[in-house]
Every structure is written in structure tokens, then in C-alpha cells.
Amino acid sequence: AMILLNVRTGQLIHTFKCLDGVATTSRSSKEKVEISCLEAAPALDTIAVGTSKGTVHLVNTRLDVLLFSLRHTSKNGRATRITSMSFRTDGAAMHYGIAPLAVGRSDGTISIWDLTPPEDDIEVGEVVQGGRTLLCEMERAHYPGGVHKLQYMPQEPLLLSTGTQSNSIVMHIFDNPDHSGRILKQRKGHTSPPSCIRYLHPGAGAGGGILANAADGTDAAACAILSSGSQDRTLRVFSTVRSVLDKEYSQGKGLEKRARELGMSDKAELLLPPVTAMASSEARSRDWGDLVT
């Protein structure tokens, strides 16, 4: 149940009835449906209610009325848990006449909806049933583990997202004519403990390894650390000086698309085996690749 409490006195103010029979029971089974997250809307007396079966309900809290519902399913047709929601409030959205809602899901996908009422809304009792528009879907934005938290920046077309297991924080910007999002910047790490770590350029000394910092004028390239994951099968480079130099070494273009074409559940099946050892050299690094794994 969804209830309203006075947090100062601890008094139960109201128990909402509009979700009875809608958000508590799954149609396909007798399994109970949980309310997984709540998010207050910019509109007065309106709240978004996310459930464990992939449905988002917009509720008028003053009148205790269900306004409409949005449903989400994964590629295999199964419902996914709603983990986080956020409303966009910048002036650009108002200029284009859209009211975006970002919905984070347990399968790692972020769905962006336009909540502007369509002209052909049909009133059924106290519920308005109409086709709200799905502006875009950012598939596997956080994989594995799904989306943990979404937050639109106040008065900006920027969306911050974090993952439960992806070990990443991503900033998406919405500046495309079709209102779809793209990645503006991100910080990512391994999704599992690293198995092998080396300085990218260990220096000419036989012992290898360096002690470098920005204060003594050391070039930032000397502060790059190679790191391989034990389970995620990725090879990354981290800079201890400039975070903008962090990146993952590519293992080929279009791996996710190719995995889907081959019927694989994840691109991990196409990645190289885990890295067990690494060697690098600065000699003639501008002429050919200087890294062997």
C-alpha cells in the first residue's frame, strides 16, 4: 500500500485507494507487485509510482486518483523492476512543449517518456487512458546490474545516472532534434576486482615502476595505469593525473549488435579471455602499438 504520513507526529494521514487492484497484483500471476520507488512531479499534487513489474503510475495525491500508467518490458517480453525516476524541468523542454520523465530499470535500460497529454485522450471513469509518447530508450546504459539512480540536473537538459554493479556514473545530454539523449561524459571502472595492474610506461630502469606526480612536471602519460578485470574481460587505462584520459581499450566495433545478431545474451561471449599478463614499451610508440597482453 501507499500511505501518507506526518513525519513530525508519526500520524497516518491517508491510505491511498486508487492503486488497489492495479499496483498490488500481477495479471500474469498471483505474485504480489511491490512499489519500488516514488518521485514527486513538478506538477502540483502529482507523484510517480514505480513498481517491481515494470509499471509507472501517475497519481493525483490530493484527489487519490490514478491519472495514467506507463508499462515497460525487456527484449524477451518480461517485465523489469523500476529502480529510479526523475522529471526534467529545464526551459528547453518547455519551449518544445514536452514534459520528459526518465525511468530507470533493472535491466540497465533508461526510458524517456513525454508526459504531455495527447489530443485523443479517452476518459474511462476517473482514469485518462491515452498514448503518452516514448521519446527514446537508452538500452544497457548500466550493465550488468541495472540502473541504481537517475537525477535530472535542475533547469538543465542533463541527466545523471549511476549503476548498481556497472561501477559507472554517466552524464547524458538531450540536445538532439528528436529529443533523444547521448553521453556527454562518464566515469567508469571495472565491474569486478582487477586481476592485473601495470604502469603503461614503466620507465627505462630495469626494475620498472615509477613514482610520478604533476607537481614535479612529470608528463601525464607517465601516470597512466593499465588495469584488466578478472570477470568483465576489459582492459582499461586510468590516469592518476587527468581523469579525462581514462578510457577502455576497444575490442572491436559493434560487439553488442553482433551479439544480438548471433542470438547471444551478452557481448561478453565475444570478448577476449581474461588478461593474465601485460607488457608495454615506449620505444617507437608512435609507429606501432606498444602494448602486448
Image (tube, grey):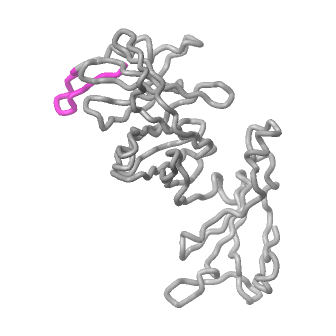
Q: In terms of depth relative to the viewer, which is nearer, 131 or 33?
A: 131
Which of the 4 image quadrants contains residue 21? top left
Pinpoint residue 235: horizontal percent, then vertical percent.
72, 62
**Magenta region, residue range:** 1-13
Q: Is residue 139 magenta?
A: no
Q: What residue do we see at 57% from left, 29% from top?
A: 80
Q: Residue extending furthest front?
A: 119
Q: Eyeballing the image, is 121 above or below 275? A: above
- Quadrant into which the N terminus falls: top left
Q: What residue do we see at 47% from left, 35% from top?
A: 113
Q: Eyeballing the image, is 47 above or below 173? A: above
Q: In terms of depth relative to the viewer, which is nearer, 62 or 236?
A: 62
Q: Eyeballing the image, is 176 above or below 219? A: above
Q: Is residue 3 magenta?
A: yes
Q: What residue do we see at 59% from left, 81% from top?
A: 220
Q: Residue extending furthest top?
A: 125
Pinpoint residue 174: horizontal percent, then vertical percent.
48, 50
